[in-house]
Amino acid sequence: MKRSLALAALAAMLACGSAQAQQINVKIGVLSDMSSLYADIGGPGSVAAAKMAIADYTKDHPNVKVELISGDHQNKPDVGTRSPISGTTSTKST
């Protein structure tokens, strides 16, 4: 009985291995006017800026996987609220 318990403990220790950094997943959403009146001001340029910022950040933090989600609100509030990006925030406003 003691031998099987010791073997089980040894197997558990070997299975754990050394401590490794865990992969962290982050999603960033950019909801901007891509095709309407203000598209020249912050549309596709804001997505490109976010991509460059993600590239700079992941270079320094290789254990963080950053996913960029972009959407077009077409300068219309009802389109922006139905966007898939608008429902991905983890903070709740009261």
Image: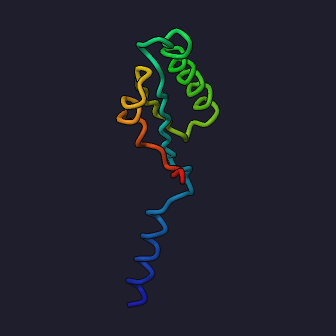
Image coordinates of residue 46 in percent, x first then y, are 54, 19
Instruction: State whether residue 67 is above or below residue 56.
Output: below
Relative to 54, residue 26 above or below: below
Image quadrant in which the N terminus is located:
bottom left
Residues 1 and 93: in front is 93
> Looking at the image, which residue sits at the far right?
60
Compared with 66, 33 (above or below) is above
Place of residue 91 in the rendered image (x, y in percent of width and height, measured from the top left): 53, 50
- Vertical order, 49 against 78 (above or below): above
Taking the spot 35% from the left edge, 35% from the top edge, the residue there is: 82
- Tell which of 31 and 5 is nearer to you: 31
Q: Specify the quadrant of the image occupied by residue 88.
A: top left
Q: Tell me the quarter of the image containing the C terminus.
A: bottom right
Q: Position of residue 8 (x, y in %)?
A: 40, 77
User: Furthest residue to the bottom?
Assistant: 1
Q: Give the side of residue 24 with respect to residue 88, left or right.
A: right
For image coordinates 50% across by 46% down, the residue present is 23
- Which residue does the image show at 55% across and 41% down from the upper left? 63
Farthest residue, direction top? 40
Report the coloring of the rendering: rainbow
Q: Could you tell me residue 78's position as x and y percent?
A: 37, 31
Q: How many marks?
A: 0
